[in-house]
Amino acid sequence: MNIFKTLLFSLCLPLISLQAFANADSQYRLSSGDVIKISVFGEADLSLERVRLNDAGAFSYPFLGEIRALNMTATELENELKRGLEGDFLINPNVSVSILEYREFFITGEVRNAGGYPFQPGMTLRQAAAMAGGLTERASQRRMTIIRDGDTSRTPERATMDTPVNPGDIIQIDQGFF
């Protein structure tokens, strides 16, 4: 019986992970630097394999011109493209948008390799620091802040190693005092 449970769990775990990943994508808001894939069923000319959103969060699309995707979810963008294609170009377009690459987050201060790194859903500050080569010997475990992408006031928030990181965030790890 235990072997059956283990086998069932190992088969279901990837499905649970995919569902969590899909939920993260359904809430994710597109912005400059994101790379998306657009598929229109049965219409190869309208399907785009890799589209990077420009600085304004927009991209050029056949027949429709510039599409502004800034702050849209993938589902909202799908609906926008369906509305644009329906009628003049297609009768009932089946459009799918998926996120191939998330925009970078940035980490500075007391890490071995400061810079920009690709975001991954579910990431914490601990994982972000690991991507940057880990903390230096002088790094403070208590003096860490994040400036959230989209925060127009650019106000640093206090953070811990378990604080979630979002795409476009700027993380600062300060020195500790000994």
Image: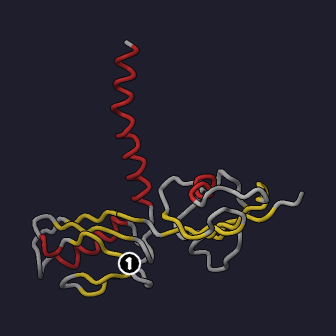
| Quadrant holding the N terminus | top left
Count how many numbered circles sit on residues in the image. 1
Dividing the picture into quarters, in which one does residue 98 lie? bottom left
Q: Circle 1: is it few (<14), some (14-19), or many (20+) Cα within 10 Å?
A: many
- Residue at figure coordinates x 60%, y 56% from the top left: 164
State how the image is colored: secondary structure
Q: Position of residue 100 (x, y in %)?
A: 35, 63
Instruction: Decide if residue 167 is on the left or right side of residue 145.
Output: left
Q: What residue occupies the far top of the structure in this picture?
A: 1
In screen coordinates, is 139 left or right of 84? right
Q: Amino acid at mark 1?
A: Leu
- Please indicate whether residue 50 sits to the left or right of residue 56 in the image: left
Please provide percent x and percent y for residue 130: 60, 54
Residue 63 lies left or right of residue 115; in this view the side is left
| Front residue of this view, candidates 134 and 79 | 134
Residue 72 versus residue 138: which sits nearer the camera?
A: 138
In the rendered image, the quadrant that contains the C terminus is bottom right
- Residue at 69 percent across and 67 percent down: it is 172
Q: Is residue 41 visible?
A: yes
Residue in the image at 46% along x and 69% along y: 103
The residue at which mark 1 appears reads as 53
**Above or below — where is 102 with respect to 120?**
below
**At numbered mark 1, what does the secondary structure look like: helix, strand or loop?**
loop
Q: Can you tell which quarter of the image residue 35 is in?
A: bottom left
Residue 157: in sight, yes or no?
no
Residue located farthest toward the right when viewing the structure as drawn: 178
Give whichever of 86, 23 is nearer the camera: 23
Q: Position of residue 17 (x, y in %)?
A: 41, 43
Residue 78 placement: quadrant: bottom left
The x, y position of residue 76, in whole percent, is 34, 69
